[in-house]
Structure formats: C-alpha cells, structure tokens
Amino acid sequence: MDFKPIGIAHSPFREAGAPPFQSTFSQAEGIIEIFPEFQEGLGSIEGFSHLILLSHFDRADRSALTEVPLSDGEILHGIFACRHYNRPNPIGISYVALIGVDEGTLHVTGLDLLEGTPILDIKPYVPAFDSIPDAVSGWVSAQHIERIRETSIRAQQEILKNQQRW
C-alpha cells in the first residue's frame, strides 16, 4: 500500500489528548490545506454542507489491540470495537461542516484533529448514503455518549479559552 497525504489539518489543538473525542462534539474551527497537486479534486465540493475527512493519526503508538476508550476509563475493549487513535493502522474519520472554500483551502467547523494531522482523503457527506437510522451501538450506551459529549465539550472549551487563535 502506498498512501500519500493530499493535505494537512490546521487546528487549534496542539497536544495529544486535546482534540474532542469525536468531531460531532467539536465546535472548533479549522482549515484543511489541500496540496497544490490535489486542488483540482475540490471541484464542486462547495455544494456540500458536510465532509468526511480520512486522516492519518501520525503520532499514534500503533501497538494496541485492546484499549480503554478515552472517555470510558474502566473497561478494556478490542481496538476494533472502539474509536481510540492507537490502532494498527491509525486512520481517523471526522465529519466536519464545510464553511467555505478558498482556492486550495477548506474552512470547516467540528474539527477534532491535532495541528498538522495529514489528510488522506475527503469524501462528501451524503445523508442518503452515510446515515444508517437503525444501526446498533454495541457497548456504547446513551449514558456513555452523553458522558463523551460533556467531557469533550468541557475540555475543548478550556483548551480554546487558554490558547491564542491559531
């Protein structure tokens, strides 16, 4: 396999553990800089309200086959049953709102990536394709999701309050 980043994320989050646990709980604005040789691929993207970003967690350990999820704190789960960044192939998925396109730059909200994270691919979010209303969440309960939301938003607000605009 040969993957080449198509761009890079510019984010207010500078340290591991700083980004929100999931992009759906993020209010952070950011920029996705697309490298010049891939900018032609942005044609017609401005018509979409949301995008799916596939990224490379380039600072991940990559050694874990089990992890305690970042927000769970107690129960060990198989790495493929959680969304922890330490994975054999540290590929991230983020759902972001597209605010605007400026030449080779995408302005987004809902970013949950560290500054400098390599972007591997971008796909348009199409509700008819990307939403599965009857999906089952496995071990992730409604209480678990609410705990993730609260923890993520609280931590994000603190980090953003203490940082200068990137």
Image (cartoon, rainbow, N blue to C red):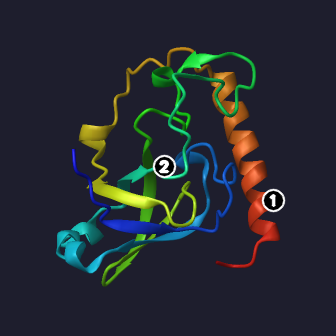
Dot 1 corresponds to which residue?
158
Q: Which mark is residue 57?
A: 2
Which tag, 2 or 1, sits closer to the chain's start? 2
Neighbor class of circle 1 (other Cα within 10 Å; few <14, some 14-19, many 20+) is few
Q: Which mark is residue 25?
A: none
Q: Relative to 19, does residue 86 appear above or below in the rendering?
A: above
Q: Relative to 121, does residue 29 appear above or below in the rendering?
A: below
Q: Give the residue type that dot 2 points to.
A: Phe
The N terminus - image quarter:
top left
- Residue, far bottom: 103
Q: Give the residue type that dot 1 points to.
A: Glu
- One can see residue 140 in this view: yes
- One can see residue 50 in this view: no
Residue, x 22% and y 50% (percent of image)? 2
To which quarter of the image does residue 118 belong?
bottom left
Q: CA distance from mark 2 to mark 1?
A: 23 Å
